[in-house]
Amino acid sequence: MKNIVVVGAGLSGAVIARLFAEKGFSVKVVEKRDTIAGNTYDYIDENGIRIQKYGPHIFHTNNKQVFEFLSQYTEWEKYEHRVLGNINGKLVPVPFNLTSLKETHSKEDAEKIEEILLKEIGFGKKVPILQLKQHSEPLIREFAEFVYQNVFYTYTKKQWGFKPEELGSEVMNRVPVYVSTEDRYFTDEYQYQPTDGFTTMVQNILNHPNISVELGVDALQHVTFEQNKIAYDNDTNIDLIFTGRLDELLNYAFEPLPYRSLNFVFETHNTDSYQPAAVVNYTTSEDFTRISEFTKFCCKPTDKTVIVKEYSKQCEEGDIPYYPIPKQEYQSQYEKYLNEANKFDNLYLLGRLANYKYINMDIAVDLAIKLFEKIINN
Ligand code: UDP
């Protein structure tokens, strides 16, 4: 039986480590940071408030297998995420819905637009903004232009440095326009937050006698390449599952892959509530994209509250790469690295960074399960 080395103790790495451990494999998980759970890492601050150090993480899925897998390692608290958009100082539901329509238009205009949306698109439908902009009805196109300008354009430029149409369509598809009064950010069947936080959940996933976790270790100092094998501490009789940056693993053999990074500015306020929703997106103003208020994510109310403002920036040396940038040209660039990685038959790539894919936590878990099954059935 080969030993397994997993590079990265984030959600993806932890899940696949656990699956191998359950099958009797000896698994070493090596993590550069001093903490587990990757960017889902959270902790309780001095006021008893759970802080998500690397920004807001909300769990939601339609995948029963993923939900049941994680449910072995955490209790859940029901949590339905709601977001408001700050449009020139007015707070309206995002995704933009029929309520947002009424709050941003005169009664007469809102009624006209609603009528044509119901007739042409249908109640309950969710439409991506770029699709709505192409609609054959001029009034719908005009409405779409309003939403595009006031919800998507500025926010997207801040977040990605690109206009909505310059990105892969999957980005705008994440936040469609709702032809209904649905005001939840997600409509998935399972919407919960782990009762004791993500770190505890990942800790429980990793807690298995066949798993050893080494924190504060840079795996790249231990990795070498030998013809068609990757070695860890000179051992090639392993399978290595890598969840970090592929360009870094391959020593930047080609152009570095572009990522977006974030600066987080945390503030503690002496009030029990800072804003009327867990997240407010600043869609027309400010340099930051959004403000998240952690006490609204599920924690017990206190007389203090903690918020975080997110400033997005190009990822430079020393920055944390949070988001791969979903653009065709970068995907082609990634594929060059992928071809190189495929030369090593005991190397497997997993997770948002290594797969260069803008994925949610549930997809990360699903991909970990699928990769495990693929390796084990090989
Ligand atoms: N988006 C936007 N305005 C909003 C919300 C989202 O333009 O009010 C766009 C933006 O490009 C963003 C993308 O939709 O990056 C996906 O939004 P989501 O909230 O899913 O981003 P995440 O939480 O993953 O950062």
Image: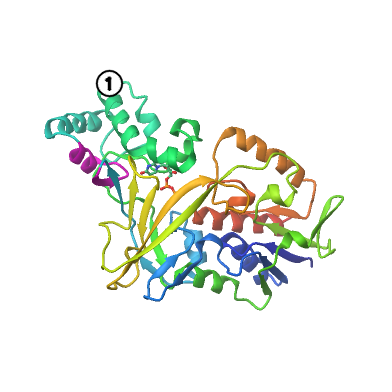
Q: Residue furthest right?
A: 227
Q: Is residue 73 something one can see in this rendering? A: no
Tell me if I can see residue 138 in this picture. yes
Q: Image quarter for residue 10?
A: bottom right
Q: Considering the image in quadrants, where does the N terminus appear? A: bottom right
Task: Give coordinates of residue 334: x percent, y percent.
Answer: 66, 40
* Residue extending furthest toward the bottom: 209
Q: Magenta span has 61?
A: no
User: In the image, is residue 377 above or below residue 251?
Assistant: below
Is the C terminus in the top left, top right, bottom left or bottom right quadrant? Answer: bottom right
Ligand 1's image quarter is top left
Disc 1 marks which residue?
Answer: 138
Amino acid at the residue labelled 1: Pro
Residue ID at (22%, 28%): 116
Residue 100 forms part of the magenta stretch: yes
| 230 or 368: nearer the viewer | 230
Residue 272, by quadrant, is: bottom left
Image location of residue 359, percent across then percent down:
52, 49
Q: 140 or 308: nearer the eye?
A: 308
276 to the left or right of 1: left
* Residue 171 placement (x, y as % from top left): 46, 40
- Name the residue rendered at 75%, 48% in the picture: 251
Find the magenta span and give its range: 89-104
371 vs 237, left or right, is left
